[in-house]
Amino acid sequence: MLYLNVNTLLQGWYPIVLVVEVSLRDGWMDKYKQQGNPYFAFVSYSSKDKAWGRWLHRRLENYPIPALFRGQELEEGLVLEKKMRPVFRDREELSGSSDLGEAIHQALVASRFLIILCSKNSAKSKWVNQEIEDFQAQGKGDRILALILNGEPNAEHPDEECFPPALRYPAEPLAGDLRKDGDGKSRGFLKILAGVAQVGFDDLYRRHERAMAKKRMAWALFAFVLVATFASLYIYAVDQKNIAVRQRILADKRRDQAEELVDFMTYSLHEKLKPIGRLDLMEEVQAAVEGYHAERAKEPGYGEAVSETQQILLSGSSMNQGDLSRMTGGAVEGRGDYLEALRYDRLLVQEDPYNANHQYNLSVTLERLGDALKESGDLIGAEKHFKDCLEIRTGLLEVNAANTRWLHSQTVSQEQLSLCMKEKGSLKHAIQYTRDCLAGRNQLVLLEPDHLDWWQSLCFSHNNLADLMMLTGSMDEAEQNYRAAMKIAERFSKEFPADMLWQKNLSICHERLGDLMLGQGDLIGARKQFGISLQIDEMLVETEPLNSNWQRGLFLMHTKLGGISKSEGKLEEAGKDFGCALDIALLLMERGGDNVVWQRDLAVAFSMLGDLAMENKEYGEAKELYLGSYEIREGLAAKDPSNSIWKRGLVITLTRMGIVQKEAGDLSGATRYYMEAFEMATELVESEPKNVVWMCDLAVLHGKLGDVAKKKGDLPDAERHYLSGEKIYRELAGINPGNAVGQRGLFVAYMNLATVKPWGSAESLSWWRKTYGQLAGMKEQGILLPTDEKFLDYAKEKVGL
């Protein structure tokens, strides 16, 4: 087990005070590394009760444990912290085998408690019963908790039974009862929570009620009024349905009003909450929407003929659930929710193919599904869905060219395809999609100059095109577009100083200009731009401390400023910025430990601190930090093995760990890490042969393996690796002549090849001439970094100039 105290670790490097003391033993990752019982509980349920299983799992893992109970040591030595994680959820019943799968068995062994969602469905499920028997066989029968959804425990009539056979009399498990005539949803949940956390129910319930009161007073008035209005309208509609024809008509009218309110909650309110990062409110709104659909499902004949409005609402509800899953890190679950929404949307289009709104809603779902696939690293699948989406939106415009909503949606699809092509390394296609997008958005602001959303989109497009121009070495056009975006952001941030989104746009523009200056070697200019961006982000966080998007922007600025300080040799300043970035990453992890982006940020923070340790030749500390980063990335890759982004993260971390071993003199250890990274990098390149990022990683690893071989005295093997790397860099330079990374890799490869040939030989001189020519060309192009000037002088001396 890894125990790491970053405060202690940093004391040997520079005077710095970190607000948060980091110990992997006390931090979130330790819950995944506990020996014996890593799961607080295992949730077992019938697949027909999947929605309840997902609800309970999220509630258990995200419920804030009251401060009174935090720090209490449980029987197994686990400490009760702010959130009770992890909880294992048996996502669906096993099939194809009469025995429990080994993974399920191991999860049961590793779980402190077993929670059974008891219903008429689970009472008949042999898999749920088998899980209970397995848990009892481990001697943990006194740790089984029952949560009753429907039916009766130990019922006289078999059809009303809710307990699986292994739970029935005389087992008498502790039970919470979600039924209306039982504990109700809140008290029933708290009974289960108290059982797992091993705290008194009465104390927990009193503090829960107190927290809920504060929460309602603080921010829930609007959501309460909205849900209360919706509930009253719907209840009134249901109560009137059997009275009289006139009253039935009135009830239908009320129902329409209720559905209009649900429509608002499903679409408009959800979209307003998403950009400000309010996951808590989004989840409450989504719960109210799902409650509406659950009540509707109880009505006679509901499943026989679902109305068009109901299908639209069901689609929107599934899509919103997908958004929530993605925002909390559940990319796989998000894809499932989007596919459910896609099913409803395709049915609507099939029933009414000329309905433009149905076509548009289908395009939105395809877009979200493409986003989820892109986040999972499936760029081919994402590209297909984005293209299908663009085809629909282009068709809508052909029918009504004056519809600015359709035009804007078309530019969004072009933007998504551009970003997808950029990640695939297809810069030519990325640039074309971005230019098309930019042209459409220029048209939008001409048609509707007072529409602020169009100006925001135009600002994004200028920044995106500038990013691509930087990658291709077209620095003048990059700067031109960054300045155009800055002009828009400055104008509207001054006109609307209270609009946080415009302030964030201004921050992004300063950040992008800083990136440009950094690429040009202007570290002073880059630091200035990053500093301005940092000030804006600090203001945003101070204004809206619960907004996770603002917090993450602050994290990124500290990493960039720390990177500049590190490259300048100012390790103390770098440590302060990296320490702040670490604090923010830990704060975000407390808010949502399942969020994969925040997990990756924490891995990045550990890696940055590991880089600083390397600069100070503290190889042991560096290795531990890199191991911390590796364990996070390994967990991400294990959850989604097909995700190429997570796999690349492992490549980077393994490469760093190899560097540590090499510098410490352990060449065998270095080779082992390099080879593991090399195999992963090769797989990535084979999956996407033209992806310039994967190609560059593979070239770097050829260089690292060549360095180790040279140090061992195996010059032929070193030359083989250097030549392989040089070949890749030449290909990269051909794809994008202005890319400084590829050009720099080429001169390093030439220089390495010169050093494996006999000193003063014609072959060695030939490689030195290539090195000098490459460096001189980079200087002429303006892409030679100041830190590389010394290599130009050295190569010049070698060729006798």
Image (cartoon, grey):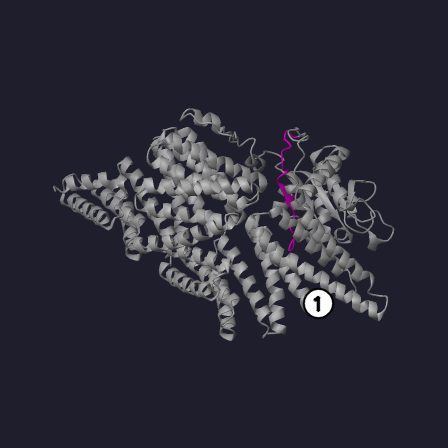
Q: Position of residue 422 (x, y in %)?
A: 40, 56
Asked whether, in this view, residue 462 is left or right of residue 520, the answer is: right
- SS for callout 1: loop
Q: Position of residue 216 (x, y in %)?
A: 70, 43
Judge whether residue 577 is colored magenta.
Answer: no
Residue beneath disc 1: 306
Asked whether, in this view, residue 277 is left or right of residue 394, the answer is: right
Residue closest to the eye, 267 or 122: 267
* Point 58% across, 75% down: residue: 354
* Point 75% across, 46% down: residue: 185
Q: Is residue 687 above or below residue 143?
A: below
Asked whether the viewer can see residue 143, the reply is no
The range drawn in magenta is: 76-97
Q: Quadrant of residue 664?
A: top left
Quarter of the image with the C terminus is top left
* Point 38% across, 38% down: residue: 563
Q: Position of residue 128 (x, y in %)?
A: 72, 48
Q: Quadrant of residue 701?
A: top left
Residue closest to the eye, 157 or 558: 558
